[in-house]
Amino acid sequence: MLRLTEKGVPLRPVRLWQLSAASTLQLDRLVPYPWISLMNANPKEIEQSARRVIGTGDRKLLELMSVLGGLRFRKKELFAERLATMTTEEIIQDSYFYQSALEKAEARGRQEGERQMLTRLLTARFGPLPAWASEKISSAGIEFLEDRSVKLLTAKSLEEFLR
């Protein structure tokens, strides 16, 4: 048998799935609550622990609970849906993961909006765009697109505009 030690003190593995969530909830200590989703817990006990974590307003514990819950349930979406029904929309929206995904989606949306607007304006000013011009605009980054939107006002030709 393998014996693990840390600074000479023997370590004992904890098998969370064997621990009773009910006894952990009775401890009335906040730190183990996110781990309850990995314990021998029924949906009511998971909900109870989630409500206690939410009640503290501690976003890090809520995020930890969401990640750990995703480990237990085969699909993270199932746990996220369960957690979402237990939380308010504002708590979910304030989470780091949500904010990060939202920022990325907004950036992509701004870039696509700039592309579409620039394409419409160029077509209105210079006529149908040749394939090379459409390709250049399609592959352009947001900075290029933003810079060119101003240059559109002074450019005499499509070639000058895309230089």
Image: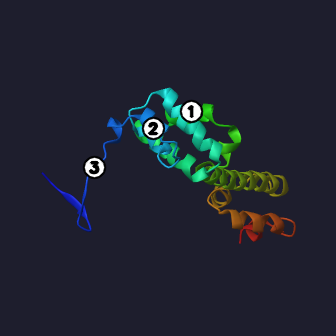
Secondary structure, mark 2, is: helix
Say what amino acid the circle numbered 3 marks: Pro
Contact check, label 2 and label 1, Cβ < 8 Å:
no
Q: Nearer the viewer, residue 114 or 125?
A: 114
- Mark nearest the camera among 3 and 1 is 3
The way the protein has been coloured in the rendering is rainbow
Regarding residue 101, the answer to whether it shows in the image is yes
Residue carrying label 1: 81
Report if the CB atoms under discs 3 and 1 are less than 8 Å apart. Answer: no
Q: Which mark is residue 37?
A: 2
Disc 2 marks which amino acid? Ser
* Real-space CA distance between mark 3 and mark 1, rounded to the nearest whole angstrom: 31 Å
Residue positioned 32% across, 36% down in the render:
18
* Mark 3 or 2, closer to the camera: 3
Quarter of the image containing the C terminus?
bottom right
Q: Residue furthest left?
A: 1
Q: Any mark on residue 13, and which?
A: 3
Q: Nearer the viewer, residue 102 or 127?
A: 102
Helix or strand or loop: what does disc 3 sit on?
A: loop
In the rendered image, which quarter is residue 50 located in?
Answer: top right
Query: Identity of the amino acid at label 1?
Result: Glu
Q: Is residue 69 left or right of residue 87?
A: left
Quadrant of res 54: top right
- Secondary structure category for the residue under label 1: helix
Is 156 in front, or is 51?
Answer: 51
Give the vertical position of 31 relative to 150 (above or below): above
Q: Image check: 16 left or right of 85?
A: left
Label 3 environment density (alpha carbons within 10 Å; few <14, some 14–19, many ≥20)? few
Q: Is residue 73 visible?
A: no
